[in-house]
Amino acid sequence: MSKFISAYYLGLLAFLGLPTSVLAQSTPAPAKPAQAATTPAPAKPVLPAPPAAADLAAAAPARQAATGPAVRYAVSFPNAVHHEARIKATFLGLTPGKALTVRMARSSPGRYALHEFIKNVYYVTATDGGGKLLNINRNDPYSWDIKPAADGTVQFEYTLYGDRSDGTYAGIDQQHAHLNLPATLCYGQGLEGRAAEVKFDLPSGWKVATQLRPLGDDRTTFAAPNLQYLMDSPVVLGAQHALHTWQDGGRTFEMATFYPGSASEVETLVKKTQQVVREAAGIFGGEYPAFDYGRYTFLADYQPQTSGDGMEHRNSTSLTSPLPLNEEGTLRDLGTISHEFFHAYNTERLRSKGLEPFDFQRVNMSDALWFGEGFTQYYGELMLRRAGYYDNEQFFDKVSQWVNVRVNSPGARYASAVDMSRQAGFVDAATSVDPNNRVNTYLSYYYQGAGIALTLDLQLRQRYRTSLDKYMQALWQEFGKPQTPAFAPAKPYTLPDLQRVLGTVAKDTAFAGTFFRRYIYGHEAPRFAENLALAGLAVIPNKVLAAALPRQVEFTEDGRCILSRNTTMGSGLYKAGIDRGDEIMTLDGVKITDLATLEGVMRRHTPADLVPVRVRSRAGVERTTQVVLTEDTNVQVQPMENVEKMTATQAQKDLRAAWLASAAAIKP
């Protein structure tokens, strides 16, 4: 261990209030480069060249040593009614005359696209420690340059506008503030390794909930060891705040709920949340992560003005929903809780090399979102079934969805799960005004990965007498459980790592290689019917004639039938040369003026019928052609014993029962 690293860890241990003697017992992680590399799949094109040095200068560096005084933030809400906060960041110990670059993040942990948070920052001023104004220069749209005076201090103040309460942005009003910190706090380039302190000037009756470490008993000032941790720590403030705390498996959990409804509704959600987190622990061998500062916080902001969302963080999750906590709303919220808490293992600690360290000025690209998000999607739903909050029919509806989206996706026939993961920068809440063709080129890595997890789990159970749970446990022990004192994974995984561990768990490296070649690097669709049959489940076609046509049209006020989206590759409309913006004037000789008329024509026909259609293109050119009334290839997954002329063997039923049985190893 170098003197540089030793000094860093000693300082960090002092920050945490831990004895420095523990340092002798710890094993430092290998140093990580400032720009994490991605691992290309075999036989794939070479990835783009590394960014130029000028670009790297603007990138957030790795979790580096903390040097210099803590960056201090003061956050107040003098104009909350108009969705504004006033923020002051104080940077101390700077070199006089050497410009400090102050930035707003362009991306946010848990997201995979750019969001340009600086667009909501205005009324900017900078002063020295005595309040004397300093000049501010703008060299690019994303930052400000300020030269410190002789005292080496820059006090940087600005107004933040925020009117979207979700996991990505900032939402401020008279009732509360839901703050995603990359959308809220600026930072000093080159000072990312410094500790931070954030003080909130609270309106009367407001309380604070966050995973940040409190300084003092009044819980208005909080600390973070570095920028990475600070930006990964959402904060919710408000008056309607019920705090439930419980102990489980040697860990402390808390749920801070901002909700205008009854206390009994919140208590019901808390009890169900407790069972969900036990199911997650069971999947990973009956243990919880070693949460930083010993606790995990659910930030549940369930108010009418919020947007439905969930966002994972190392020791907390941001939960927003406008739904009341009735039976339907609670089940939907539990689905978000289940997914996001699973992320405390998978993606937060068991983390892809492409996501570590997180870069606040560019998009981190991961080849493995089919695993990080897709396997989490699978387990998020499976945990609700194992906990008893889904019945079989509800869970099998989710399974049917994973099958249907994969089978009906043209894009997945040509692009691999790795390719889909690499598109995250353009689809993960990213916005643009130009039309795209993603209906034909893209399949969500959430659903694609869930389908892969489903088939792999059933294969492991039937062929190798093991399970996907055992696979996740093996990955956890090697890549997730070991963490550095800097709150980072000691060893982020790569795609070859995932394949190697699969071979070890199955005790069949050839199987692992074939599986990855076909379904991860390749384009093959999982054999859903064959694999679901292992659990006594039948895949029953659910044919809907020409459903793709009514689903893709809109009717104008004057009764015109317009194609509102790109037609799907391989469909009858696509083959007939009909696309977005075209008008269907007549179908099978009938003038189409409303949805009822269109559906009436459909009912007169059977699949594969060829019917005449009169079309006017968006350029105004009319023509008559023929269209095949194709049908959706949707299916419904059902137990074989519920299907006429089918039966499930006892072995199939036993496999299904073991698959769906509670895995909770930690009891209340």
Image (cartoon, rainbow, N blue to C red):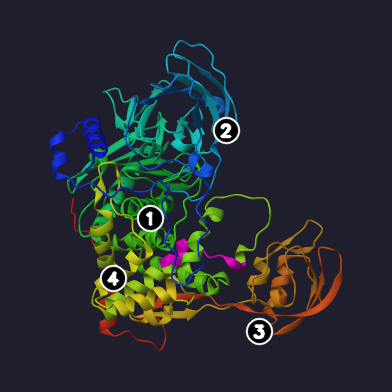
Q: Name the residue under label 1.
A: 353
In space, the residues marked 4 and 3 are separated at their CA atoms by 39 Å
In space, the residues marked 3 and 1 are separated at their CA atoms by 51 Å
Secondary structure under the numbered disc 2 in the rendered image? helix
Type of amino acid at the residue the image marks with label 3: Thr
Pinpoint residue 476: horizontal percent, then vertical percent. Answer: 26, 58
Q: Mark 3 points at which residue?
A: 606
Q: In which quarter of the image is residue 373?
A: bottom left
Q: Determine if the magenta segment contains residue 442.
A: yes
If you read the primary sequence from the N terminus, does the residue marked by circle 3 or circle 1 appear first? 1
Identify the residue at image location x=40%, y=28%: 239
Compared across the picture, whether 316 is left or right of 51 comes to: left
Stretch of the chain drawn in magenta: 440-450
Compared across the picture, whether 120 is left or right of 648 comes to: right
In space, the residues marked 2 and 4 are separated at their CA atoms by 48 Å
If you read the primary sequence from the N terminus, does the residue marked by circle 4 or circle 3 appear first? 3
Task: Say the numbered circle drawn on residue 659.
Answer: 4
Do we see residue 39 in this rendering?
yes
Q: Magenta segment, principal secondary structure?
A: helix
Pinpoint residue 205: horizontal percent, then vertical percent. Answer: 39, 23
Q: Name the residue under label 2.
A: 120
Identify the residue at image location x=50%, y=61%: 47
